[in-house]
Image (tube, helix red, strand yellow):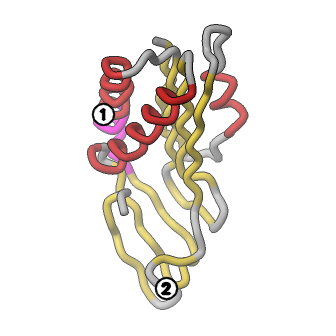
Amino acid sequence: MKKNIALSSSPLSIETCIRLAESEQAGAIDVFIGTVRDQTEGRKVTHLEFEAYEPMAIAEMDKIAEAMAARWPIISVVIHHRTGFLKIGDVAVVIAVATPHRKAAFEACQYAIDTLKQTVPIWKKEVFEGGAVWIAAHP
């Protein structure tokens, strides 16, 4: 399995993530793109700030990739997550998963984002009009 795991304070490139996942052996590449929305629970969001404990976050994302390879025929996986200040519409996370067939790509990609939100030490500060709150990077 080929993997590319990264945290970045710079904007993420969806096209680069897809290119990194591409393989002649792949019949499917499933891509999840998480973006910053303008509201949460009825409150208007002005921006987000992400912080991560980088060594552990990279290690946990690598564990996710390895767990995926144990369950599905993964050819390649790309997991890139932003840190720092993100405005509305910015891309916060890109996950690209290449497999021989689409079902495995869909399942593995969903597993990756669900597990990332549960286990990776990334924290999100949601800044609202009139306030802010730090939360884990999961719903």
Residue range (magenta): 52-58
Q: Looking at the rendered structure, which numbered label has been put on residue 43?
A: 2
Marks 1/2: CA distance? 31 Å
Q: Residue 6, percent across and down?
A: 49, 33
Residue at 56% over, 28% down: 102
The relative height of residue 76 versus residue 54 in the rendered view (above or below) is above
Identified at 44% across, 15% down, the residue is 73
Q: Residue at x 64, y 13 (%)?
A: 23
Horizontal side of residue 136 vs 23, given as left or right: left
Question: In the rendered image, which residue does mark 1 sit on?
Answer: 60
The dominant secondary structure in magenta is: helix
Between 4 and 8, the residue placed more toward the observer is 4
- Report x, y in % for residue 113: 42, 44
| Residue 119, placed above or below residue 42 | above
Dot 2 crowding, Cα within 10 Å, few <14, some 14–19, many 20+: few
Going by the numbered disc 1, the residue's amino acid type is Glu
Closest to the observer, 27 or 112: 27
Check the picture and name the quadrant holding the C terminus: bottom left
Residue 31: image quadrant is: top right
Q: Quadrant of residue 133?
A: bottom left
Whether pointer 1 and pointer 2 mark residues with C-beta atoms closer than 8 Å, the reply is no
Which residue shows up at 56% across the image and 16% down it?
100
Element marked by disc 1? helix
